[in-house]
Amino acid sequence: MRGIFWCFLLMAAVFAPRAAAAKTLTVAVEEISYLPYHGFQNGNFVGFAQKLLAAWAEARGDSLSFEPISVKRHVEALAEPGIDLVWPDNPAWRIDEKAALGRPVRYSGIVISGLKGVLVLHREHPLSVAQVTALGTIIGFGNDMARLGIDTQDKQMIETRSLESLVEMLAANRVDGIFCDLHAAEYELRQQKQNVGFTLDFAAGSPRSESPYRLSTAARPDLIEDFDAGFARNTPTVDRLTKEAFRAGGAS
C-alpha cells in the first residue's frame, strides 16, 4: 500500500496542473470486470486505469465520476451529453458506428496494450484452434475475432456478460477455449479459489493480437491533449504503476 501511495504523490507532482476551477469529469467505462486493466468492486471502479486516471485528474485539480456502460453502448457513450471521456477505446473498434456519429473521435496515445487470442487450459499438448469446438467469449468481442480471422463457422459459440463466468466455463470444461485477453483471464483465474492450480495457454495456431487501450472523446479533445502531455512526462512512474497492477495478484 505504501508503494501505491508514493506512486500517487509522484504522479500528481509530474502531471502538470492547470490553473482552473475544479471540475468533475465524467468517464464512461466498461461495466465488465477486466482486471487488472479495469473493473468494478463493490460498485467502485478499480484497477490500473482507475489509478492512472485519478492521478491525472488530481494533478489538474479535478475529480472523476465513472459511469459504467455496457460494451454495446460504447459508441453511444461518445455522443451522450455529459460524457467527457471514454475508457477503454481503440481506433480499430466499431469504425462504421463511430463514423455515423458525425463528429470526430479523438484518441490518446497508447496507455497500455493487452494480448488477445483463443485461450485453453494448460496441458502437455495444448488444444489447437481447430480442436476447440465450443468457444466462449464476452458479448461484444465478436468483431475482434473477425479481425483476427478466427473462423467460428464450425464452432459452438457461447457468449457471456462477464469474464468471471467465461473463465468458470473454461475451468469446468463447459467450453474448450475462450477468446479474451491473456492477462485478464489469468487474473480472474487466480481469484477463483475453486480453480487454484489451473493455468492457461494460447491454443496452438491461435492468432494473437495486441490490443492497445486508449482514452477517447468526441466532446473534449483538450482533455486528451492534456492527458497525453502528462503521460509523456511521467513515464517512469507510469511504468512503476503498471508493474504493480500486473504482477501476480495485483490490480486491487
Image: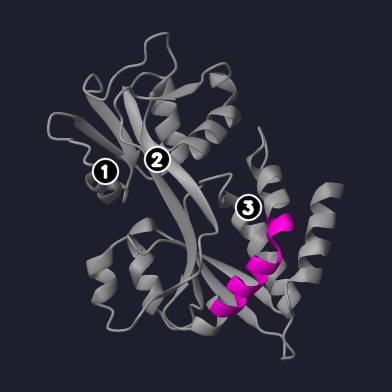
Q: Nearer the viewer, residue 110 or 97?
A: 110
Q: Residues within 10 Å of mark 2 (few under 14, many from 20)?
A: many
Residue found 60% across the figure and 31% down from its top: 191
Q: Secondary structure at mark 2?
A: strand
Q: Position of residue 16 (x, y in %)?
A: 73, 78
In the image, is 133 to the left or to the right of 234? left
In the image, is 170 to the left or to the right of 195? left
Where is 160 relative to 31, above or below? above
Quadrant (top left/top right/bottom left/bottom right) for the C terminus: top right
Residue interval drawn in magenta: 225-238
Residue found 23% across the figure and 77% down from its top: 100
**Is 156 in the magenta?**
no
Residue 78 appearing in the image:
yes
Residue 148's tag is 1
Q: Secondary structure at mark 3?
A: helix
Q: Residues within 10 Å of mark 3 (few under 14, many from 20)?
A: many
Q: Position of residue 137 (x, y in %)?
A: 33, 39
Q: Quadrant of residue 212?
A: bottom left
Where is 12 relative to 41, above or below? below
Q: Position of residue 88 (x, y in %)?
A: 47, 60
Residue 116's tag is 2
